[in-house]
Image (cartoon, rainbow, N blue to C red):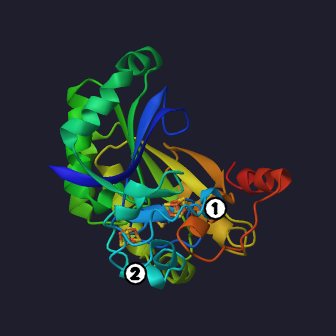
Amino acid sequence: MTGTIFDIQHFCTGDGPGIRTTVFLKGCTLHCPWCHNPESQSFRPEILLNSSLCISCGSCDGVCPAGDAKTTLSTAESRAACGSCTACTDVCPSGCLEIAGKRYDVEEVMAEMLQDEAYYRHSGGGMTLSGGEPMAQPAFSKALLEAAKAAGLHTAIETSGDGRKEDFLAAAPYADLWLWDIKMMDSGLYRELTGGDLDKMLANLAAVAEAGANIRFRVLYVPDFHDRDGIAEATAALLKSYPQYESEVIPYHLLGNAKREKLGLPEMRFREPATEEISRFAAFFG
Ligand code: SF4
Ligand code: SF4
Ligand code: SF4
């Protein structure tokens, strides 16, 4: 059983209880414009180019089957010619070319996870699956959760709620906690901005809740979007319909733009909310 992962981060403290290792799966069925991990959206490996580190050594000249590596990687359009062969990353001496996305099998992930086993046991931590969308690689995600549970670890999975209901239900027995992202409680805007189907997300949420899952809502806040008339109210109504679950506000931040630049994508022009705006938005949900 293998899957594609673009990062494994150790000693995380914000993705569930205790000290955790967060496994970021590559590939997402949505395309949120505010995504802070834009390298997570494509299912295939991608090369990140940090031009500021380039020392113009010329080592990547001539190794690129698409022509010239830096030109190929310079825009989203020219990247269509990149076959992710990694020839340029192999020869770059300055670390400005890195690959996002590598195949792992379950045993490899667990071996890396269990390096920090003592920390999980002392803190009540464990494994969190994030992404990308873990439920876009449902069999691999389920296998990872199952292996972590078998090792006696706490398991969490962060999801947008997009995917097949049967996959959510198959994973549910192995997830101690679902971190359920609320992206946009307006079906028209949700479809327009993310490409997703709000009714499908809500049906998956209801099914997982019905199965007895422990859920924590993560309510995204992009100022001038989520505080528009009717949207905060719809979000509050959703949270109220699940009074047994806690929620937290996740304010938009600009970190995704640095990664967009490395992917040849244009900057996103959302703004970060001020502290008082976050407090006002959070107060809406009691
Ligand atoms: S990964 Fe391969 S195809 Fe893509 S830019 Fe580098 S050398 Fe060229
Ligand atoms: S190998 Fe790396 S440092 Fe050298 S020119 Fe290419 S991108 Fe720049
Ligand atoms: S669901 Fe998450 S990973 Fe997928 S595009 Fe939206 S923010 Fe990015």
Let me know if residue 34 appears in the view. Answer: no
Amino acid at circle 2 = Gly
Position of 252 relative to 112 (above/below):
below
Is 260 situated left or right of 272 in this image?
Answer: left
Let me know if residue 64 appears in the view. Answer: yes
User: Which one is in front, 71 or 203?
Assistant: 71
Amino acid at circle 1 = Ala
Residue topped by disc 1:
258
- Which element carries disc 1, helix, strand or loop? helix
Is 76 situated left or right of 225 in this image?
Answer: left
Q: Nearer the viewer, mark 1 or mark 2?
A: 2
Residue topped by disc 2:
67
| x then y, percent, for residue 264 | 56, 74
User: Which one is in front, 165 or 7?
Assistant: 7
Is 236 situated left or right of 206 in this image?
Answer: right
Task: State whether label 2 is within 8 Å of ligand 1.
Answer: yes
Indicate which disc, 1 or 2, sits on the residue closer to the N terminus. Answer: 2
| x then y, percent, for residue 99 | 41, 57
CA separation in Å, label 1 and label 2? 25 Å
